[in-house]
Amino acid sequence: VQLVESGGGLVQPGGPLRLSCAASGFSIRDYVGSWYRRDPGKELESVAQIGWSGDATTYADSVKGRFTISRDNTKNTMYLQMNSLRPEDTAVYYCMVKNGPTTYWGQGTRVTVSS
């Protein structure tokens, strides 16, 4: 059972980046999906959440209108499209899926927004 994030890296302010979260060893179909982030010295922040079917999404105020969470259950993958990135978006981003008491986390992918 594994979640693997990818797509992080260095991007200039105002630029886009797309994160992926690929699941293996289980199906994410029945799981609510989320993206979190943590900058060193700061608390873990919930960024976005998506329902199992993909039709219900919520966002932190800090990313609303700039980030889009989505999922493709046929590919067992969740995504986070990040646009208009700001230096304050710099963090390690983690994906998480949850179904009742069962929760799986990815290992994280670093996003750095800097000129």
Image (cartoon, grey):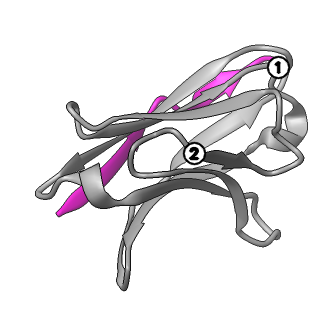
- Specify whether residue 93 is painted magenta: no
Is 84 left, or right, of 80 in this rendering? right
Q: Secondary structure at mark 1?
A: loop
Foreground: 45 or 110?
45
Amino acid type, mark 2 = Ala
Label 2 sits on residue: 56
Q: Quadrant of the C terminus?
A: top right
Disc sitting over residue 33 in the figure: none
* Magenta range: 1-12
Asked if one can make out residue 107 in the rendered structure from this viewpoint, the answer is no
Total numbered labels: 2
In this view, the residue farthest toward the left is 25
Which tag is nearer the camera, tag 2 or tag 1? 2
Q: Residue at x 59, y 43 (%)?
A: 110
* Residue at point 39%, 44% (across, down): 53
| Residue 8 position (above or below residue 50) | above
The numbered disc on residue 84 is: 1
- Image height of 106 relative to 111, above or below: below
Query: x%, y% of residue 2?
Result: 23, 59
Disc 1 residue type? Ser
Q: Residue 97, image x and y in percent?
A: 40, 61
Question: Is residue 9 covered in magenta?
Answer: yes
Residue 3, given in percent of the width and then of the height, sits at 30, 54
